[in-house]
Amino acid sequence: MPSIKVNQNFDKALQISGTIFYVATNSETREKLRTASLLGIDSKKVMLANSATDTQLLYVESGIDDSTLTADSTNRANYIVSNDMMDSSFTVQVDNRLFSGVWQLNGASTFSAPASSTTITVPDSLESAGSSTSATNLASYSNYSARGVANLLYTPTTSGRSEKSVLAGPRGSAAAVNFSTTYTGGSGTATPSVFTQYGKTAQNLFASGDTFDYIDTTVYITGVRSTAAAQIPVRLIRLNTPA
């Protein structure tokens, strides 16, 4: 059966902190979080909302997570393409009280790593995913269609490249997303009421003296053809008062 899994192995991949993925509402918040005592100086554990370039991205892969099937072009064709499980798009469902849009890969290049190659290509150029529709299965959620890009990451047969895919078997497609939010005001502005209603405010979250407002939510990503799905825990966070 097909699976969708979050990939944290790519250079620009957003990495989880504890049990949740962090999305900063503005640059001030991201810079504060990118310190050793908070989320780390390597910047990999926070994504900057509304950004198409200068940010980590949330990557997902669609395919078969079965180590008995080699991730090569033959098995990709036989198990995914021939069975109509190639996700050329993904439905991304987000809470519309928090997020006003979704960013997707622009489709200019594929995920690529031939088996005998030491190089890997991972797309990271984003564009807007366009308008949304109302989710019929989740209250206050909107559906966006995010582009799926061919995932040609094959199991390496050379010692010069490590495996970057998180799927043990053949891979079909992959996607990367970011989110838009309207709550971009800095620490000198009033806390938006949505954080009071649905989250927590003025929290000394990291025992650093800095206080933050945040809301925890779930993003749902489903492959349009495979119907494989992932539930991704996300924390939308803004700096309230710096130490």
Image: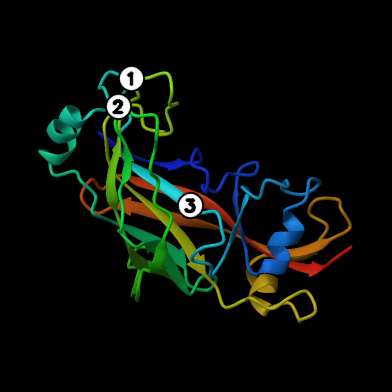
Q: Position of residue 101 (x, y in %)?
A: 45, 72
**Disc 1 target residue:** 157
Q: Dot 1 lies on which element?
A: loop
| Amino acid tagged 1 | Thr
Does residue 23 sit above or below 2 in this rendering?
Answer: below
Is residue 90 visible to the viewer in this orientation of the structure? yes
| Amino acid tagged 3 | Leu
Dot 2, crowdedness within 10 Å: few (<14), some or many (≥20)? some
Q: Position of residue 118 (x, y in %)?
A: 39, 29
Q: Position of residue 138 (x, y in %)?
A: 40, 64
Of marks 2 and 1, which one's residue comes earlier in the chain?
Answer: 2
Q: Which mark is residue 115?
A: 2
Contact, CB < 8 Å: mark 2 with mark 1? Answer: yes
Nearer to the camera, 45 or 236: 45
**Disc 3 target residue:** 58
Does residue 67 sit above or below 207 in this rendering?
Answer: above
**How many discs mark residues in the rendered view?**
3
Q: Dot 2 lies on which element?
A: loop
Compared across the picture, whether 164 is left or right of 207 comes to left
Q: Quadrant of residue 80?
A: top left
| Amino acid tagged 2 | Ala
Q: Dot 3 lies on which element?
A: strand
Is residue 140 visible to the viewer in this orientation of the structure? no
Compared across the picture, whether 41 is left or right of 232 comes to right
Contact, CB < 8 Å: mark 1 with mark 3? Answer: no
Residue in the picture at 33% in, 19% down: 157
